[in-house]
Amino acid sequence: MIVPIEYKEMELDAQLRCDFFVENAIVVEIKAVQEVLPIHEAQLISYIKLLKVPKGILINFHVTQLFKEGQKTYVNELFRNLPEY
């Protein structure tokens, strides 16, 4: 999905693309890298802020145990403001 970027009420043509945007609520970014770098985390955090969603998941397939080592969840201020059920 192309991530829209607005600056001073203008939409920029930056062609940012998130890997998956699930139910307009969660951004999923897929990697297959030896080490998740801060730039990968910054990319996901930028996507969740630009898309105005509370949660993002970074999945790295270059690990031996995907469940334990290969995923990390990120939340922003929108997540803290969600109502509890």
Image: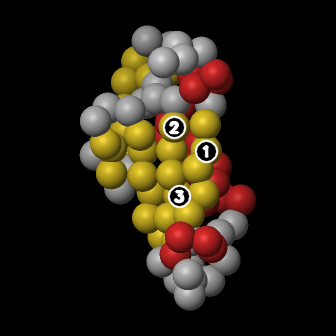
| Nearest to the observer: residue 14 or residue 76 | 76
Q: Quadrant of residue 80?
A: top right
Q: Amino acid at mark 1?
A: Tyr
Dot 3, how many residues are within 10 Å of its Cα: few (below 14), some (14-19), or many (20+)?
A: many
Residue that sits furthest to the front in the current view: 85
83 versus 49 height, above or below: above
SS type, badge 3:
strand
Residue that sits furthest to the right in the current view: 38
* Residue pictured at 52% horizontal, 30% vertical: 54
Say which mark, if any, is on residue 55.
2
* Residue pictured at 56% horizontal, 63% vertical: 71
Residue 12 percent across, percent down from the top left: 40, 31
Residue that sits furthest to the bottom in the current view: 64
* Residue pictured at 53% horizontal, 58% vertical: 58
SS type, badge 1:
strand
Distance of mark 1 from mark 3, alpha carbons? 8 Å
| Nearest to the observer: residue 39 or residue 27 | 27
* Residue 12 in view, yes or no: no
The residue singled out by tag 1 in the image is 74
The answer to the question of whether label 1 and label 3 lie on touching residues, with beta carbons closer than 8 A, is yes
The answer to the question of whether label 2 and label 1 lie on touching residues, with beta carbons closer than 8 A, is yes
The residue singled out by tag 3 in the image is 58
